[in-house]
Image (cartoon, rainbow, N blue to C red):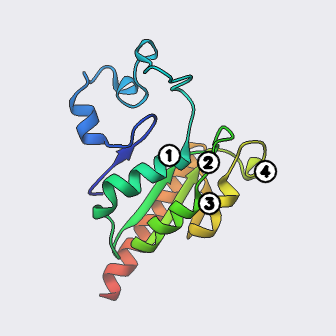
Amino acid sequence: VSDIFARHETMAAIDQVMDSYQLQYPRSAVYGDEKDKQPGDKDPEISDYGTALAQFLDKFSDVLDHRTTLIILGDGRSNFLAPKADILGKIREKCRRVVWLNPEPEALWGDGDSEILAYRPHIQELRPCGNLSELAAFVSDLFSILLYSDVQK
């Protein structure tokens, strides 16, 4: 892992964000303080994947190349905002592959404000990851893939 990014209101490299916060308040580093709403900011606590993807492409596309595996952790719920799936497609064009780990069960994908099905065409691997067992299975699979690709070189 060379770069980790987080987004709630503004996409940022997580190491830069965490450097500016005390270690005992890591949640504030990502979510901000509810009292610090910007003017016109109706609810800073909602997801906006379309804006997050656009910011990521604009600010950090230089870290993507044919060797990059982009791993997205999130439910894909847009809160009825534009999902901008085409932007994930542009990001995908720069990467080796895109993996999306969704904490929700598959039965909820596409339900309500879930836009995960709109993103699916741009994702090589989409899997539920809502508990430690599912996360452990993903990590095990990832290491197997990495070891196999190293052996093939």
Residue pointed to by mark 3: 119
The single residue placed furthest to the bottom in the displayed view is 152
Question: What whole-number distance in Å separates the C-alpha atoms at marks 3 and 1?
Answer: 14 Å
- Which circle's residue, 1 or 4, is located before the other in the chain? 1
Q: Nearer the viewer, mark 1 or mark 2?
A: 1
Q: Residues within 10 Å of mark 1 (few under 14, many from 20)?
A: many
Say which element carries label 2: loop
How far apart marks 4 and 2 lie (CA) works out to 14 Å
Q: Say what amino acid the circle numbered 4 marks.
A: Ala
Question: In 3D space, how far apart are the residues under numbered discs 1 and 2 (Cα atoms)?
Answer: 12 Å
Residue at the image position 33 percent from the left and 66 percent from the top = 64
Whether residue 95 is visible here, answered yes or no, is no
Provide the secondary structure element on which disc 3 rests: helix
Q: CA distance from mark 1 to mark 4?
A: 26 Å
**Please, is residue 147 above or below residue 152 in the view?**
above
Residue at x 45% of width, y 57% of height: 71
- Report the number of numbered marks: 4
Q: Nearer the viewer, residue 90 or 138?
A: 90
Q: Give yes or no for contact between labels 3 and 2 (Cβ–Cβ under 8 Å).
A: yes
Residue 107 numbered tag: 4
Q: Which residue is mark 1?
A: 51
Q: Earlier in the sequence, mark 3 or mark 2?
A: 2
Q: Which residue is mark 2?
A: 76
Q: CA distance from mark 3 to mark 4?
A: 16 Å
Q: Residue furthest left?
A: 19
Which of discs 3 and 1 lies nearer the camera? The answer is 1
Comes first in the chain, label 1 or label 2:
1
Q: Position of residue 20 (x, y in %)?
A: 22, 28
Mark sitting earlier along the chain (4/2):
2
What is the x, y in percent for residue 150? 31, 80
Q: Nearer the viewer, mark 1 or mark 4?
A: 1
